[in-house]
Image: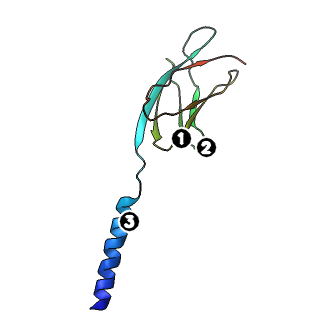
Amino acid sequence: MKRLWIIALLTILVSGLSSLTPRLREALINGKVISFEESLPLEGVSIMVKGTKNGTGTQPDGTYTLAVKEGDAVLVVSLEEYETQELKIRRDQQVYDVVMKRK
């Protein structure tokens, strides 16, 4: 009987702890990347979450969409021949437009 109580107590404890574990939510962010000099959209720009393999590239019209986790902090925006930029991800912001300058 004592053994059943211990098993029941451990089961309740483990299920209770799993509900306390924070679950990372995802949010969709998007934006448009254009060139500073020509004010034209840039295709193929790499948009990565710093320190992860989570990323995407811009479409022909310069737009992108990316799912980011709540704990993600920085976007790295890069394209050959342009200066790489880092943008801080904020919880209250979904749109990140970028203007890139040539090196």
For image coordinates 45% across by 27% down, the residue present is 30
Quadrant into which the C terminus falls? top right
Residue at x 41%, y 37% (from the top left corner): 27
Alpha-carbon neighbours of circle 1 within 10 Å: few (<14), some, or many (≥20)?
some
Q: Residue furthest top?
A: 38
Quadrant where the N terminus sits is bottom left
Q: How far across and down, in percent of the image, does residue 5 sit?
A: 29, 84
The secondary element bearing badge 3 is classed as: helix
Q: Position of residue 32 (x, y in %)?
A: 50, 20
**Under tag 2, what secondary structure?**
loop
Residue at horizontal 53 percent and vertical 25 percent from the top: 58
Query: Along the line of sight, which residue is nearer the eye, 14 or 80?
Result: 14
Give, as a three-letter code, the residue at label 3: Leu
Front disc: 1 or 2: 2
Left or right for 72, reference 24: right
Mark 3 Cα shell of 10 Å, populated few (<14), some (14-19), many (≥20): few
- Three-letter amino acid code of the residue under disc 1: Asn
* Residue 10 placement, left or right of 36: left
Cα gap from disc 1 to disc 2, whole angstroms: 9 Å
User: Which disc is residue 17 wearing?
Assistant: 3
Residue wearing tag 2: 51
**Disc 2 + disc 3, Cβ < 8 Å:** no
The answer to which image quadrant residue 10 occupies is bottom left
User: Which is nearer the eye, 84 or 1?
Assistant: 1
Q: Earlier in the sequence, mark 1 or mark 3?
A: 3
Q: Quadrant of residue 48?
A: top right
Residue tagged by mark 1? 54
